Amino acid sequence: MTIATPFQKRWQAAGYTEQTPIQTAVYQPLKADEDVVGLAPTGSGKTLAFGLPLLEKMVPGDGLQLLILAPSQELAIQTRDVLTPYAKDIGITVQGVIGSANVKRQLDRLKEKPEVVVATAGRLLELIQSRKLKLDGLQTLVVDEADEMLRDPGFDQVREIAAAAPAEAQLAFFSATPSPYFKELHKWFGKTPDIIDVRAIDRTRGEVRHLFLQTDRAHQVDWLRTLAHTDGFKALVFFNQNSSLERVAGILRHQAVRFAVLSREGRQTVRQKALTDFRRGRITLLLVTDMAGRGLDIPKLPAVVNFEPPKRAEVYIHRAGRTGRMGEAGLVVTLGDDHDRRDLSKLVPQYHIHRGYMSEGKLVDTPPAKKVSEASAPTTVEKLASPVAKQQPVKPEVAQEPAVRPRRKHKKHRLRDQRNKGKHKDNA
């Protein structure tokens, strides 16, 4: 497969020299209107894998022909921004439709009849149900991050959107991890897409280290602050619950840490500013939940931090996939206690997760050498509990006291003796 002539110049300007396995594997099937499920590692170029061959089929001025569904607003915007330059080269318009954006402004842009729409399911359904958007001429429906989109509540939303499209519309599902629904799509969508899985042959991932920093719950924020002050450190910090994210954010606001929050409840302008500041290096930590961080592409992201270990293997895979993309080196750091470490090793045995240590301001996977003068210092585990805790000074030994000591008088008795002594002087 070779990149189509209209896209060649832009492709090369972006620094690409050859197609990734998923881009090569799905190119002809998508061009031939076949239904597919594309499985490839995170960071392997899935957006252009489905975007370029489908854009080649577009007819300028012929209305909505391609609809791409994304699980989060950030991913929808990111996909729109990736495809827009290529679309412009062939006279095609790409429009984003997301939940937190101004509805009136979106409707005005939809009146311009864009050929491609990238959307989140909730807002798109609102427009379809209110008959503000029709899918009569749709040629292809792409479901990105499909393993997540086909989980509740997204599953019913995707089915309803697919039902509003023509029965002959092409279906394409893309993901880094499989879903049990992929083998049952004929039951729910009336089609049996070909599963194209290149995970075993894809080598686009760079070398990624996986470290586990053992600590108790009380000192996790201490570790996060220490990591933020490590030279060259920059990371997406993942949380299992939004409540945990907000709690940690509240603590970090009173500390010298440059961070921002990517919250689903925040306004789009605030969320976009946080993401832009992070991409440009203005902040060190970007706190996110799994939904907000799904599919985000941060070029040359050094690290990902699991503030809380994930409960599902696919969640760890997607989090880890934010770093080490397109051949770059990466680092995944997980915070937790010994119980968390054992559970994580069982959850994702395919990764070699090593115990992490802080030594001379750097993260290492070997215990720091113990100096002779530190014989009375806390153990390695105690040090790891809080990286910023200061060692308590060792008390000097007290000289051996005599076995029998004179009994000391009570205070009131001493005062009485002093008064009596004064009387004796007066009478002398």
Image: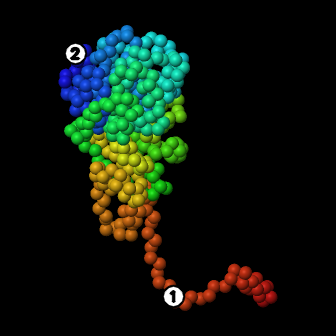
Q: Nearer the viewer, mark 2 or mark 1?
A: 2
Query: In the rendered view, does 217 fall on the left or right side of 297?
Result: right
**Crowding at mark 1 (Cα within 10 Å: few <14, some 14-19, many 20+):** few
Q: Check disc 2 and report the residue beneath it.
A: 5
Q: Check disc 1 and report the residue beneath it.
A: 402
Q: CA distance from mark 2 to mark 1?
A: 97 Å
Q: Specify which label sits upstream in the sequence, 2 or 1.
A: 2
On-image quarter of the C terminus: bottom right
Query: In the rendered view, does 203 fall on the left or right side of 85?
Result: left
On-image quarter of the N terminus: top left
Query: In the rendered view, does 380 fall on the left or right side of 413?
Result: left
Task: Looking at the picture, tell me which residue is in the foreground, 268 or 182.
Answer: 182
Query: For residue 320, which quarter of the picture?
Result: top left
Residue at horizontal 30%, vertical 13%?
90
Q: Disc 2 residue type? A: Thr
Q: Disc 1 residue type? A: Pro
